[in-house]
Image: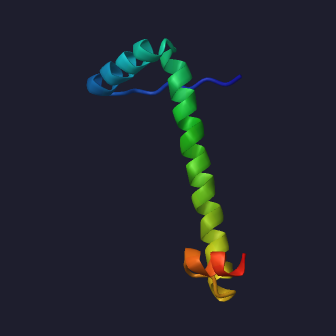
Amino acid sequence: MGSLTIRIDDELEKDLDQLAKAQHRTKSDLAREMLRKHIAVERFRALRGKALPLAEAAGYVTDDDVFRDM
């Protein structure tokens, strides 16, 4: 398993501490979860960026276009 060291400002550290205590989790657990979610969102955006031109070329511009053909 790899490791990562980051510097955060005092306010962010305070917020992270409070959240960790409220959820009975470690700051590391929360940071891993947040990183995973962020990476998933970025991957989705990248895929959407690749798929959107193909969808538009096929006539799918709005949700209604998709539902029309379903």
Question: Percent position (x, y) of residue 23?
Answer: 46, 17
Residue 41 in picture, x, y percent from top left: 56, 50
- Residue visible at 71% across and 22% down in the picture: 1
- Residue at 55% across, 78% down: 62
Instruction: Name which residue lies at 35% across and 17% down.
Output: 18
Residue 17 at x, y percent in the picture: 38, 16
Q: Which quadrant of the rendered structure holds the C terminus?
A: bottom right
Left or right position of 11 against 69: left
| Location of residue 54 (image quadrant) | bottom right
Q: Is residue 39 above or below residue 6?
A: below
Give 59 or 34, whichever is nearer the viewer: 59
Horizontal side of 18 relative to 4 (left or right) equals left
Occupied quadrant, residue 32: top right
Query: Coloring scheme of the render?
Result: rainbow
Residue in front for this viewpoint, 3 or 61: 61
Query: What residue is rendered at 31% in x and 19% in y?
Result: 14
Where residue 50 sits in the image (x, y, percent)?
65, 71
